[in-house]
């Protein structure tokens, strides 16, 4: 593998069509498409400043690097990437990719990040700010996620999440086949229009959670006191620990809780209107 070390590159496509190359302490400065149409690239302790540094790259390892704000839209159409111990300060990273792994990565501007990724593995990742991360991605496995970005995980499919703390609103809208374990989900309008969303040992806060859901399952979950109008027009099987403030017009299924503050069933309930709701005896 060719080594390029302690150098700075700028301008248009300075490392175009490079293959089997290791970059150490390299800076990609102002310019565009620093590393494009490349394969088998390693980058360690590198700094990325210019726009679009990794496009159409096949197989790469990125470690101990920094992506500055100017490197927006940095990594698109690049399959088989592993990134570790890296800080990203730029928006719109990671689009249209297959087989992406991140470990110990902090993204400080997560705006429109992780769009249409097929095969995403995350371990100990932090997301700050921005909107719509993970939009329309699929086949995702996560262990350790801290996020305060808005509108996360919309339209995702086939997702397994462990040990996450997500503070947002409109999270997990119109998802399919998503299971979340041992996590904290804070924000309004969680999981609306979802299909086969399963929550296990999760704590949920925010208004109107889990409405219009199809085949919703909750196991040993807890709810904050602000969770009112829960499960409106949903079909579900829910085992709730502790108290839930208010349940409104669930469509069908069964809900069991240690304590139920109030139940709202009115003329607007949708058929079959046969949900069983009961406090645990």
Image (cartoon, grey):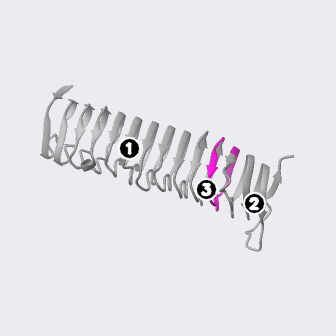
Does residue 61 lie above or below 252 as drawn? above
Residue 224 percent coordinates (x, y) = 66, 51
Nearest-to-viewer mark from 1 and 2: 1
- Residue named by callout 1: 107
**Residue drawn at point x = 87 percent, y = 46 percent:** 281
First in sequence: mark 1 vs mark 2:
1
- Compared to 249, does 85 lie above or below? above
Separation (CA) of disc 3 from disc 1: 25 Å
Residue density around tag 2, few if under 14, some if 14–19, many if 20 or more, within 10 Å:
many
Could you tell me which secondary element the residue under label 3 belongs to? Answer: loop
Q: Is residue 28 magenta?
A: no
Asked whether 158 or 243 is in front, the reply is 243
Residues at discs 3 and 1 in contact (Cβ within 8 Å): no
Q: Which mark is residue 17?
A: none
* Percent position of residue 139, x then y: 49, 44
Magenta residues, as a range? Answer: 201-221
């Amino acid at each position: 593998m060719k080594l390029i070390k302690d150098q700075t590159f700028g301008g248009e496509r300075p490392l175009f069509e490079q293959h089997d190359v290791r970059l150490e302490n390299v800076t990609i400065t102002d310019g565009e498409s620093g590393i494009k149409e490349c394969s088998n690239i390693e980058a360690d302790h590198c700094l990325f400043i210019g726009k679009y540094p990794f496009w159409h790259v096949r197989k790469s390892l990125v470690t101990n690097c920094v992506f500055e704000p100017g490197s927006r839209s940095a990594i698109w159409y690049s399959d088989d990437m592993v990134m570790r111990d890296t800080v990203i300060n730029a928006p719109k990273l990671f689009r249209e990719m297959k087989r992406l792994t991140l470990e110990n990565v902090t993204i400080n501007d997560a705006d429109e990040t992780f769009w249409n990724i097929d095969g995403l593995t995350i371990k100990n990742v932090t997301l700050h700010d921005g909107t719509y991360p993970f939009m329309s991605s699929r086949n995702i496995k996560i262990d350790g996620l801290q996020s305060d970005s808005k509108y996360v995980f919309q339209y995702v499919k086939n997702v397994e999440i462990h040990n996450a703390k997500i503070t947002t609103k409109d999270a997990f809208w119109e998802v399919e086949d998503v299971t979340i374990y041992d996590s904290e989900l804070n924000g309004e309008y969680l999981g609306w229009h979802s299909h086969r969303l399963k929550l296990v040992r999760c704590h949920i806060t925010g208004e109107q959670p889990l409405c219009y859901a199809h085949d919703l399952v909750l196991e040993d979950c807890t709810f904050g006191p602000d969770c009112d109008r829960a499960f409106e027009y949903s079909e579900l099987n829910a085992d709730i620990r502790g108290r839930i403030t208010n349940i409104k017009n669930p469509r069908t299924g069964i809900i069991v809780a240690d304590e139920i503050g109030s139940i709202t069933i009115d003329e607007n309930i949708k058929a079959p209107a046969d949900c069983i709701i009961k406090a645990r005896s």
